Amino acid sequence: MKFTFTAYTVLIGAALGLYQFGLKEQIDITSPVSAVLIVGTLLGLFMFVLVIRNRVYFVKIARYLNEQRGLFFKQNPLGFENIAQMETDPKQPLFFHWRSTHLWLSYIMALMNAILLGVLLFIAAPYTCWKWYIIVFVSLILLIIQVFSAILYLYSHEKK
């Protein structure tokens, strides 16, 4: 998370700094800055997908371990009990659980991707009276698409 947040912060800061430098020096560097932000947004979306895939992998492994624990504790070997209350239900953890740290990371990444897109629109979009409304609307749409597609993807694994 530290690496990801640092990467987003550096991307946004560098883009806005270069944009400000271009305005001050009256040099049009909108295209290179926009290209960097597009690549950053695409990489951010890719990292978002990887975090969601990592959640699926984690849940499958955790469920397998829970199944093994359940089998072990059913046999009560040498009187060994589950005093620590380790999970033994092979249907846990859920693929989608809104309080999961995996999903909180994905929520933050989705928000950062939306902010990155907002910065891209701020720099690349021509000046209009509706510019801020467009930036906020498009950024919110990207945020909602990411979060709901992740939720639907995780719920689809619950039924497999």
Image (spheres, helix red, strand yellow):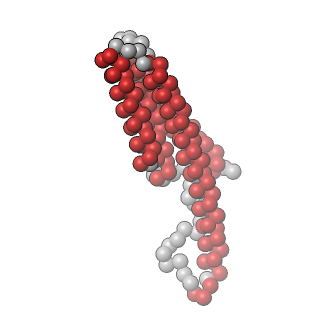
Give the residue furthest to the bottom: 78
In the image, 108: left or right of 145? left
Q: Position of residue 107 (x, y in %)?
A: 46, 42
For the residue pair 154 and 125, the one nearer the viewer reads as: 125
Which residue occupies 69% across, 51% down?
A: 160
Q: Does residue 61 show up? A: yes
Q: Position of residue 154 (x, y in %)?
A: 59, 46
Which residue occupies 56% across, 58% down?
A: 93
In the image, 7: left or right of 82? left
Q: Does residue 137 show up? A: no
For the residue pair 99 and 41, the one nearer the viewer reads as: 41
Residue 102 position (above or below residue 152): below
Give the residue furthest to the left: 24
Which residue occupies 56% across, 84% down?
A: 80
Q: How many marks?
A: 0
* Residue 153, picture quadrant: top right
Which residue occupies 53% across, 77% down?
A: 82
* Residue 149, picture quadrant: top right
Residue 71 position (above or below residue 131): below
Q: Position of residue 89 (x, y in %)?
A: 59, 65
Q: Position of residue 134 (x, y in %)?
A: 42, 19
